[in-house]
Amino acid sequence: MNSKNKHEAQIISTYSRRMLVRTDRNELFPAKIEGKLLKPVCGDIVEIEKKHNEPDFIITKILPRKNSLVRKNKYENKEILASNLSEIVVVIGNPPSPDWFLIDRYIGSAEKMQIDASIICNKSDLNWIDDSIRSNLAVYSKIGYKIIECSTTQDKNLAEIKDYLSKKTTILVGQSGVGKSSIINSLSEYSNLKTQSISLAKKEGKHTTVNSNLIDLPNDGYVIDSPGVRDYLPDFNHENEASISFKEIHNFGLDCKYNDCMHIKEQECVVKFAVSEGKINERRYESYKRLVNKIKSSENKKNY
């Protein structure tokens, strides 16, 4: 950049209007957002500027994003969770028991973003992965999604996860309590960054919590630790976009008689025929229909 006071940096931690940023020289600085319109998220590349009489850097611009993980919040508004991702990893564990419909929606967002998706089964030392769970996991494996079983307490398969996440920027998502933070703690020097993030967050107020962190991993990898959720709805503009989220439904749907086939009530539907023949998993098809109905419901709320 032309000005000595301006730099490019990446958002490392977010909480309220304060951020922790890292420059290309690997320097960490606290920064504040200029104005109310800018809404940086973890993974964003931003422009920061040092202004007169300001102790912190000021974030003045968000550079174009390669992609972004988006959801609709309870007010049906678009909310960006993270950006510039290579992969979405859904972490499951028991407790809590896996929510397969939630898993489908996260994986569906990866399909929409045209990035990779995978599933990590944590807490394998608790022997919760029974035949029923393995049957569900086999469906994802057959479609092409990588499955890794691990245990942070027994150090099981953590080396495999390290290798798999190398040279990627990954976000770990899933329900509260599945052990996302435990996995990250086992993979990285997380504690140092976490301590800095909390210290900076306290300047914003004693009730402020860190929303997310982008953390260094071995082998040039990065991982974003996101808060646990109970539900997640991808940001779709229309229900006919839902099939993008389901790779197998989308691929069979290319041969449907009608270009706008929703694969639900239509006659001569290739997707419905594939379900009846067992070529498409029935639970995944049910998940697809649920997503269509969720999107329709969201659209109806917008119209009122």
Image (tube, helix red, strand yellow):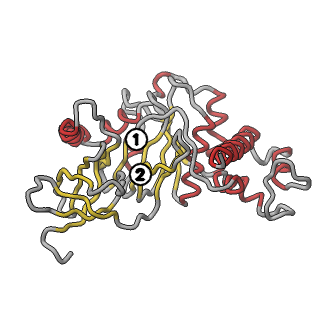
Mark 1–mark 2 CB contact (< 8 Å)? yes
Q: Is residue 242 left or right of residue 60?
A: right
What's the residue at 61%, 52% (across, down)? 144
At label 2, the amino acid type is Ala
Q: State which quarter of the image contains the C terminus.
A: top right
- Picture quadrant of residue 25: bottom left
Question: Of all residues shown, which one is farthest toward the right?
Answer: 267
Q: Is residue 91 above or below residue 145?
A: above
What's the residue at 46%, 57% (across, down)? 68
Percent x, y of residue 40:
35, 54
**Which residue carries the number 2 mark?**
82
- Most foreground residue, 179 or 46: 46
What's the residue at 70%, 52% (across, down)? 239
What's the residue at 64%, 52% (across, down)? 245
Name the mark on residue 138: none
Percent x, y of residue 58:
21, 58
- The residue carrying pointer 1 sits among few (fewer than 14), some (14 to 19) or many (20 or more) residues within 10 Å by Cα, namely many
Taking the image as drawn, is residue 43 in sight? no
Taking the image as drawn, is residue 185 in sight? yes
At label 1, the amino acid type is Ser
User: SS of the residue at dot 2?
Assistant: strand
Percent x, y of residue 1:
21, 75
Q: Is residue 250 left or right of residue 203?
A: right
**Which residue carries the number 1 mark?**
226
Q: Is residue 212 left or right of residue 284?
A: left
- The residue carrying pointer 2 sits among few (fewer than 14), some (14 to 19) or many (20 or more) residues within 10 Å by Cα, namely many
Q: Is residue 184 above or below residue 52?
A: above
Q: Is residue 17 above or below residue 63?
A: above
Percent x, y of residue 77:
52, 48
Q: How many marks?
A: 2
Query: Which comes before the other along the chain, label 1 or label 2?
Result: 2
